[in-house]
Image (cartoon, rainbow, N blue to C red):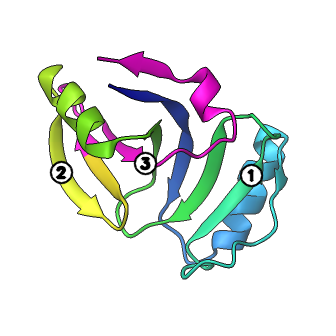
Amino acid sequence: MHKSRLAGFIIDCKTDDLEQAASFWSAALGFSLAPRAEDASPDKYRELHTGPNGLHVEVQRVEHESRVHLDIETDDIEAEARRLEALGARRIEQVHTWLVMEAPTGQRFCIVRPQRSDFAAGANQWP
């Protein structure tokens, strides 16, 4: 048995100026920019502050064409991948700790570890 739910949206931007892209989306959506992450790639990601239990919204610098993709958070990435494959999705690529998938309709999305503090209480439970 595992749990999963929509974690949020990642705004993929093919840009050399992540800060400018993040500032645009911050102003457009009305969310402030969160402090810069101290992770290994601070020049690749900027998170928007949506509140303690708000959806995770992040601006990401990418090499492919700009698009928006969603993340599904789960406490068991492999079990969630198998559940979604049974619905028709297919695996594309393992990246660090997450898995890139593709829906039968062609949209790419990621399966990630829990992102929000209320995950356990708010996620769907699957057999």
Q: Secondary structure at mark 1?
A: strand
> Foreground: 32 or 19?
32
Q: Residue at x 29, y 34 (%)?
A: 80
**Nearer the viewer's eye, disc 2 or disc 3?**
3
Q: Residue at x 51, y 30 (%)?
A: 6
Crowding around mark 3 (Cα neighbors within 10 Å: few <14, some 14 to 19, many 20+) is many
Where does label 3 land, which residue? 112
Q: Is residue 119 above or below residue 65?
A: above
Q: Quadrant of the N terminus?
A: top left
> Foreground: 16 or 60?
60
The x and y percentages for residue 56 are 64, 43
Question: Is tag 1's residue or tag 2's residue first in the polypeptide sequence?
Answer: 1
Q: Quadrant of the C terminus?
A: top left
Q: Is residue 5 magenta?
A: no
Q: Is residue 124 magenta?
A: yes
> Foreground: 83 or 26?
83
Q: Is residue 2 above or below residue 20?
A: above
